[in-house]
Image: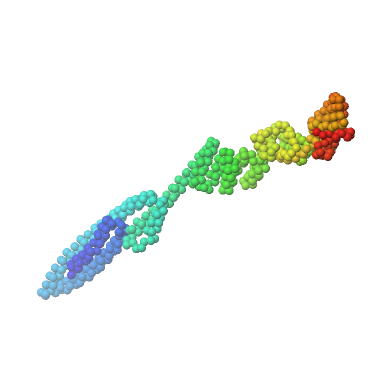
Amino acid sequence: MNSKSRRKKRTSYGKTELPIERNNDTLVTDQNNTSADEQEKKLEQEKNQVLADLVENERHEDSVVDTEVEQTAALDSDDGDPEDAAVKQQLDQKSEAQLAEEKAIAGDEEAIEDEEKTEALMIEDTEALMNEQTEALMDEKTEALVEVINEPYVIENTESLVFKQQKPFKHKKPVIIVSSIILSLLLVGGGVAAYLNYQRNTEISNDLKNGETLLSEAKFDQAMKAFEDVGTLDADNPDAIFGKAKAYAGLGDYGNARTYFEDSLKRITDLEKMKQVYNAYIDSEVNAKIGEEALFALMDRAAKDTGDEGYIKRKGEFMVKAPSFNLNPGSYQGTQAVDIIKGDPADKIYFTTDGSQPTTASPEYTTVIELTPGEKTIKAIEVGANGYPSKTIEGKYIISASSESILENNISGSWTSRSGSYFYRYYFSNGYLTYSYSYGNNSSYSSTGNYQIVGVNPNGTIATLSVFNVTGYSLPSTLNINCEPLGDNMISINTRGYTYSP
């Protein structure tokens, strides 16, 4: 019974070990069907089962040996009985068989130890092989993922792989591989995103530096292109917006420069950077010659936003005394002359008489401005040594004809009067007078002289002329002229009642 039982038990041991050998082979040949964790757990369970069977077998064998010893002792106590001798002989044979079987068991235990060592080595080799192959597989998958990371279908396929499986996995190893791929995807995706962000930031930084360099070289068109390139990567980049403002100012496009300066100020909170923007903004407006009032308003705003009172003090650099008119604007009768007085003798004055804004391209003032009848608006600026203009002064003048000029207009030309056979003529022309008269016998006399209007009514119709420098005969030194009523094309001269007509 012992021999058969032990052989049977050994046979069961062999059956128990066969799956180990088979499963190890499976692990080596098919990495995609069994995970390393499952194999190790299974080997551990089988090992524990073998040890439990060995313990149980030892207990059974000890029980059998004890029974046989008792039987042998009983036989030894009765040597005379032939039957007992036969039994003893039989027991001796069984003992020899038992010893042989125990030796076989000892050999089997050594074999088990060898098998366990072999098993441990196989597990270790299997794990190393799995790690090596898994690593190689992950490297291969990672390279593939890097190539397609920017394709939209990658994420969709990954979601489908992880969350949309219709059937559960039969083995854990594919789950580990898929999980590894997903993890690799996330890691690679994060790495690619970080790399792309790094590239983007590097490109932005290089374009900004290039733009500033081009500005310093006065290559404003090229600088504008560099800052626009930044805008394609980051439309809200305040440094690029500030750079475009400076480029526009350099190109003389002060309107666009003003727009971008204002835009950059909305995006900048750092005080030092804000000061840089305001300084460039003010310089641009000075070059644009916007006028003292607007410029000083900008400086006041800069002082308020930055807390730097230096902007208030800086006003003195651009404060130019305004000129003045010697004749107050208003309505006047007769020709007038306007003189523009400088605030600082070293400055220059530029003016216009058509109401337009004067600049340094306007006529420079050098002599008085004559105002003839009509309406005229004079504007003038004074430009200091720094080239910055003062406030603009403006004067609107309405000039109407004087009574003297009306009289001149009324009497200008030749007037004739007939009295019997006598003809009397007066010729008036801008202060020059000729007088003549003729008799019926064709004899005549004439005189010439200059005249000056010494009195005239507001309508310019009745006046007294003082005649001087008379040459010739019969020209009185004083003439009284009456042009009323106007429109009849006739005048009366002196009080003799003569009426003259052209």
Residue 469 sits in quarter = top right
In the displayed structure, 44 sits above or below 304; it is: below
Q: Position of residue 164 (x, y in %)?
A: 38, 61
Residue in the foreground of this view, choosing between 265 and 127: 265
What residue is at 43 percent from the left and 47 percent from the top? 195
Task: Compare residues 36 and 398 and report the one nearer the observer.
Answer: 398
Task: Count numbered badges in the picture.
Answer: 0
Query: Please, which residue is most extreme toward the right here?
Result: 496
Task: State the image coordinates of residue 202 (x, y, percent, origin top left).
Answer: 47, 44
From the viewer's side, name the closer residue of 404 and 253: 404
**Horizontal side, residue 352 vs residue 183: left or right:** right
> Where is residue 109, by image quadrant?
bottom left
Q: Is residue 292 left or right of residue 42?
A: right
Q: Is residue 381 above or below residue 40?
A: above
Q: Nearer the viewer, residue 32 or 156?
A: 156
Q: Residue at x 17, y 73 (%)?
A: 74
Instruction: Name, please, the residue furthest toward the left.
Output: 82
Residue at the image point whose x is 15% and y is 73% from the top: 75
Q: Position of residue 412 (x, y in %)?
A: 79, 33
Q: Is residue 384 visible?
A: no
